[in-house]
Amino acid sequence: MKQYLQITVKDTGIGISPDMQEKIFDRFSSTMSGPTRNFEGAGIGLALCRELAKLHGGKITVQSDFGKGSSFTLLLPLKRPARPTQEKFKKPQDLFNEKEREWFTKIQRDAMTTGTDLMLERDLFGARSFAQKNKDSQKKIILIVEDNPDLLSFLGAQLQSDYRLLLSRDGEEALSILEKDQPDLVISDIMMPKMNGYEFCEKMKASSHHDIPLIFLTAKADLDMRLEGYQYGADDYLVKPFNVQELKAKVKSLLILSQMHKALQTKNRELERTLQELHETRDEKLSYVTHMAASLAHEIRNPLQPIQTYLDILQENHNEPGFLSKMIQSIIPHLNRMESLVDQLMHLSKIEKPILSPLQPIQLIEETLHLFEPKLRMRKILLSKDFSPSSHLIQADKSQLSQVFFNLIKNALEAMPQGGELLIKTKVLTKEENKIYQISFRDSGTGMNEEVLKNLFTPFFTTKKDKGTGLGLSISKQIIQAHQGTLSVESQAGHGATFIIELPVEKS
């Protein structure tokens, strides 16, 4: 008859309900179910104790009255039976079945991957911030809110190589951290002391930090619990025990989505600011501004809709291999189109400072005329050039000045739909002892009356109804002014028009 050593541990605590008395020995189980409690177990302690007792030929049992306390009994044999000499010695893990060996290996791996530099302070809920490491690093910052020191340390060990970390023991402390630091993402437990995860999430989403994505860690993930979390503003869930690779994938996906969301917000603010500037400087031509704003808003809304659709699909399928990259590649062209539209609007408020270099205007005019040769022939427009031979150069931005020449020649051709004559003339003048390079574009088109001439360079003013934006001449004048020059026009109704550019000659 075997003899056993019996060790009994009794307590007068809250006890364990009958339906939980065997489940407490399951891995990752916990008898605590409330969202707010003072202590949390990792759910492996009692499971590990039972496995160790089994390895020694013993066992652990429990007796408990709910509300009156519990009694745990450990039985260990005083003497192990002798093994046959021919019996091969088995390693402890060889005593497990396949499922148990898998869990045993995981425990070993987790223990080995828990970084020693992430060991917490020795008080029960100690935690310290690691965001100060590599303070100037470009790594994203993640706030981990978890009251279990072992799990907090493990999470930190898995993420510290890719991110800067902030560690917190409960929601109350996490809120104070948010006021001092600005994390890019939050990983939070639900069941915590002082302030649980739901309360923390609700307060964070109601503050200026509402754009920060949040992942909930939970041992329970039934539908009601998920819905409750989403109502408080959670962005995703991760069920304990979780796969580390799944955690990293969710973190990476949410950070990318957050970055894209911020980019869209920035573009939206730029558009609003530009429209506001237009609003503040508008005059009696408000109708033209309104028309253009509506047109541009329509153009910007077109790429916004597919972007939103792609983001919705991405949110639902972000764990699918290769799906993330495919969605990003689909979204980028729409973002580029929005950026192009915003850049056009920006021309209304400012012209980029020209990058000056010496150039010969005649050569640039010839290059621009080459683009219009087919249209000149088609409209039967006679082109005349009176280029004064001169070695004088001007300081100009070739790209910007080419844009001005293009706008003026295009404007002249549109004024002669039935054909006519275009004369381009250059000469060097002396005004107040300064040499001026003058370039004129004279057409034999319909000409303009005084009312049109008065508003010709006003943004959005156009005589072409729905065919023109009213930006070409306005932008051209701003470019010439940025070159310290002038752009003027002379015209009479029915007698054509002459646009005159005057720029300072480069000094020897």
Image: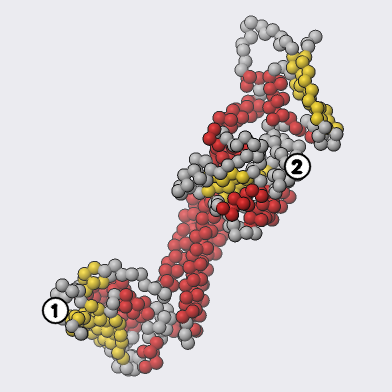
Q: Quadrant of residue 246?
A: top right
Please name whichever residue, 420 or 53, is drawn nearer the observer in this view of the structure. 53
How far is disc 2 from disc 1 in space, using C-alphas?
A: 92 Å
Q: Secondary structure at mark 2?
A: loop
User: Left or right: 104 with respect to 73?
Assistant: left
Q: Quadrant of the C terminus?
A: bottom left
Q: Nearer the viewer, residue 203 or 260?
A: 203
Q: Nearer the viewer, residue 458 or 35?
A: 35
Left or right: residue 218 compared with residue 252: right
Residue at 63%, 6% (x, y): give it.
86
**Amino acid beneath label 1:** Pro
* Residue that appears at 72% across and 31% down: 26
Asked which quadrant contains residue 205, the reply is: bottom right
Which residue is painted at 66% across and 37% down in the image? Answer: 124
Residue 446 lies, in percent from the top left, at 33, 90
The residue under the point 62% across, 21% down is: 93
Q: Is residue 348 left or right of residue 113?
A: left
Residue 476 is situated, as x and y percent measured from the top left of the image, at: 34, 78
- Mark linked to residue 389: 1
Q: Earlier in the sequence, mark 2 or mark 1?
A: 2
What amino acid does circle 2 point to? Ser
Can the viewer see residue 222 in this picture?
no
Q: Number of numbered discs present? A: 2
SS label for mark 1: loop
Tell me, what colour scheme is on the image? secondary structure
Residue picked out by circle 2: 33
Measuring from the top left, give residue 69's x and y in whole percent: 83, 32
Quarter of the N terminus within the rendering = top right
Please say if the residues under marks 2 and 1 sit with CB atoms less than 8 Å apart.
no
